[in-house]
Image (cartoon, rainbow, N blue to C red):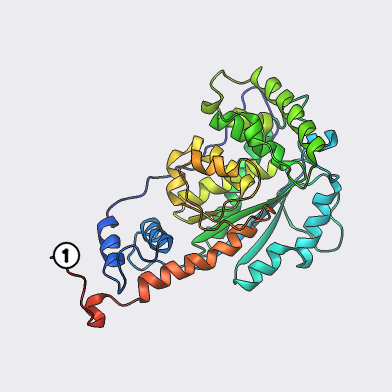
Amino acid sequence: MLTETNTLQPFLLPAVAPLSGALDAALQRSIDTKTKPPGALGLIEVLAHRLGAIQQTLTPTVTQPTIVVFAADHGISVEGVSPYPHEVTAQMVANFLAGGAAINVFAELNSITLRIVNAGVATPIPGAAQPQDASVAPGTANMLHASAMSEAQLNDALSRGASIVREISASDCNVIGFGEMGIGNTSSAALLMHLLADVPLAHCTGRGTGLDDAGLAKKLALLQQVAARARTVLPANTTAAPRGVLRECGGFEIAMMVGAILRAGHDGMCIVIDGFIASAALLAARALRPAVIDYCVFAHQSDEAGHALMLQHMGATPLLALGMRLGEGTGAALAIPLLRAATTFLCNMASFESAGVSDRSDD
């Protein structure tokens, strides 16, 4: 674990190059000359183009798709921002390891490798099976009263997330998604959205794991206090201070996901963005390295309050809208078959010429 000093240097973020447009015209020509009316496959065509552009090939693939679930606790959970105690984080990690969660069954169904990472779970994880240990600390500080993490801890989380993806990328995986588990993490995500996207906090704050109206009102009031505290130590323009916002209001699993997203973009992987929490991590990653969004596809629009606005802020079109708000990477797991469909369409579907079918006439 890093030790904070007065001369602490920030983690050197992975560089992310903008996508080359060299193949754009050829990809579009390949898509448009398939045996179908132009645009008839809708978002599948857009997805095929994006995958070809990311991989810089007319024949993209989905190879060894992987979802990494980062788990960590949040100090603010003691304030009652969730109806569940923070011990549920460790219990759900044990459930992931036992194969009993939604992400397990969807990943198995769709032949997706699943990796569970302890980014900072506060209590011991029950059972003999244990996740990959990348723990920064046993949960963040209570951000109502202090920075969620130190600068050293932020560096540690970013670095560890990037290292995990570097290892996965080296195993020939070219499609990666991220999930999370952490009681209280919708509070962090709402604050990141508020401070990085300049959206009113009331529009960013939802019911999380199932708050009633009174619980939601309490959560919003608490987050308003957190935002006020954070603004006393952040620059006036918080949208230009992603590291500071992560330090003041983030979670270890979110910061680790930021490092992971940036490394995935650096390595030219297709990044499948899940729901509200993962999108908040991308919001911070994009503020740090704007080109990273070029490598992303958006799995679904979560039913968590604020996600539709967050997607709109990033100019994103989700592949699915199923009314889900579970997290864990479940939306990413359900969207990866659509990536496979897009690559199969682009690589295997006949063209008008190869099939001997007359193309349309515009005369």
Q: Can residue 329 be seen in this view?
A: yes
The residue positioned 68% from the left and 62% from the top of the image is: 103
Between 75 and 150, the one lying in front of the other is 75
The residue positioned 39% from the left and 59% from the top of the image is: 55
**Quadrant of the drawing holding the C terminus:** bottom left
Looking at the image, residue 259 sits to the left or right of residue 292; the answer is right
- Which corner quadrant of the image does residue 112 belong to? bottom right
**Residue type marked 1:** Asp
Q: Can residue 151 be seen in this view?
A: no
Looking at the image, residue 199 sits to the left or right of residue 98; the answer is left
Residue 91: x and y in percent read 83, 55
Residue 238: x and y in percent read 56, 24
Between 358 and 315, the one lying in front of the other is 358
31 lies above or below 163: below
The residue positioned 46% from the left and 70% from the top of the image is: 341
Looking at the image, residue 291 sits to the left or right of residue 282; the answer is left
Q: Name the residue under label 1.
A: 362
Give the tally of numbered discs. 1
Residue furthest left in the image:
363
- Helix or strand or loop: what does disc 1 sit on? loop
1 lies above or below 352: above
228 lies above or below 202: above
Residue 254: x and y in percent read 65, 43
Between 179 and 13, the one lying in front of the other is 179
Residue furthest bottom in the image:
356
Crowding around mark 1 (Cα neighbors within 10 Å: few <14, some 14 to 19, many 20+) is: few
Residue 272: x and y in percent read 53, 55
**Quadrant of the drawing holding the N terminus:** top right
